[in-house]
């Protein structure tokens, strides 16, 4: 199965923006929002003022059809050029990477496994990436992610865009099957295109935008439970104190918070070896 892209150009030259959906096959909110916007542009309801926008609504078609995260390997760990692609996702990366490199800005739309508000990853603080984060419509911006993964050579849409000298932002639009996630994705795309002047209208700064610096990555090393085992106890963005218990292994070992901060993206169903949760610190209540 091949990927399909949809490109729209205004008469007036301007910035080029790329919108990616379903890099992970079971994260479909970005695909649906992109399809809605494509239909609205094609019908004439929405018009481009300048520049261009390219949509790839479904970046991993086989995984999308199977409603699973990936087929062979996680596509968002292999976004680079592969001379001898061995896996399905490496072949997809060879198609997607040059398209990212050819655009001024890439917006990559995802969803997550746990409930909680939407958020964006600002991995590389390029001027336009910061500008987009301020108007996306999501209340939490997470920075510092690449520093937690310094020991890996993972290649993400964000790291590849950065290496290509381009700006990019990833948005987690909500829980996988929440209908609201499609609206979050739609607003994120629309506000990004307004920021660049591709769509008419002013993108408004997001109210109460918080910036969290992610600092600690905790991998599940054995059987155990988060908090008291209920998802309500350990939620995304819940405040924690230094040395507060966050998880407990079946052997009785306690996992404590390394500092005062907030819990990020707790994964109740994490398997051994998966990231269990992260801890970050709140940077500001003001805009990005
Ligand atoms: Zn994802």
Image: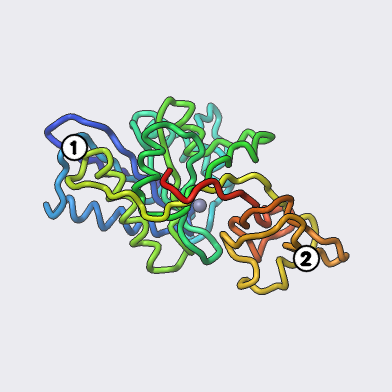
Q: Residue at x 85, y 61 (%)?
A: 253
Which badge, 2 or 1, comes first in the chain's sequence?
A: 1
Q: Quadrant of residue 193?
A: top left
- Looking at the rendered structure, the secondary structure element under dot 2 is strand
- The one nearer the camera, 110 or 211, is 211
Label 2 within 8 A of ligand 1 by Cβ: no
Left or right position of 207 against 15: right
Which residue position is annotated with label 1?
Answer: 9
Q: How is the image coloured?
A: rainbow
Q: Residue at x 63, y 61 (%)?
A: 267
Which residue position is annotated with label 2?
Answer: 224
Q: Residue at x 74, y 61 (%)?
A: 244
- Looking at the rendered structure, the secondary structure element under dot 1 is strand
Quarter of the picture holding the C terminus: top left
Question: Residue 278 location, x and y as percent?
Answer: 65, 52
The single residue placed furthest to the right in the displayed view is: 251
């Amino acid at each position: 199965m091949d990927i399909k892209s949809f490109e729209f150009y205004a008469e007036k030259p301007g910035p080029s923006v790329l919108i990616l959906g379903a890099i992970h096959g079971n994260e479909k909110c970005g695909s649906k929002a992109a399809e809605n916007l494509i239909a609205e542009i094609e019908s004439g309801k929405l018009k481009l003022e300048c520049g261009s926008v390219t949509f790839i609504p479904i970046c991993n078609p086989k995984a999308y059809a199977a409603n699973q995260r990936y087929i062979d390997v996680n596509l968002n760990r292999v976004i680079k050029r592969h001379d001898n692609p061995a896996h399905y996702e490496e072949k997809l990366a060879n198609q997607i990477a040059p398209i990212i490199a050819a655009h001024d800005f890439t917006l990559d739309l995802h969803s997550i496994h746990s409930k909680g508000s939407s958020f964006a990853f600002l991995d590389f603080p390029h001027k336009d990436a910061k500008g987009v984060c301020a108007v996306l419509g999501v209340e939490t911006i997470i920075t510092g992610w690449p520093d937690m993964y310094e020991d890996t050579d993972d290649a993400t849409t964000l790291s590849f865009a950065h290496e290509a000298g381009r700006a990019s932002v990833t948005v987690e639009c909500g829980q996988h099957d929440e209908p609201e996630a499609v609206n979050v994705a739609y607003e994120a795309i629309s506000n990004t295109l307004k920021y660049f002047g591709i769509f008419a209208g002013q993108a408004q700064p997001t109210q109460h935008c918080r910036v969290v610096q992610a600092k600690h990555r905790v991998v599940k090393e054995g059987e155990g439970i988060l908090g008291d085992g209920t998802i309500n106890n350990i939620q995304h963005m819940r405040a924690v104190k230094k040395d507060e218990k966050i998880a407990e292994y079946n052997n009785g070992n306690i996992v404590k918070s390394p500092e005062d901060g907030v819990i990020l993206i707790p994964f109740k169903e994490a398997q051994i070896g998966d990231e269990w949760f992260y801890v970050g610190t709140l940077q500001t209540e003001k805009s990005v």
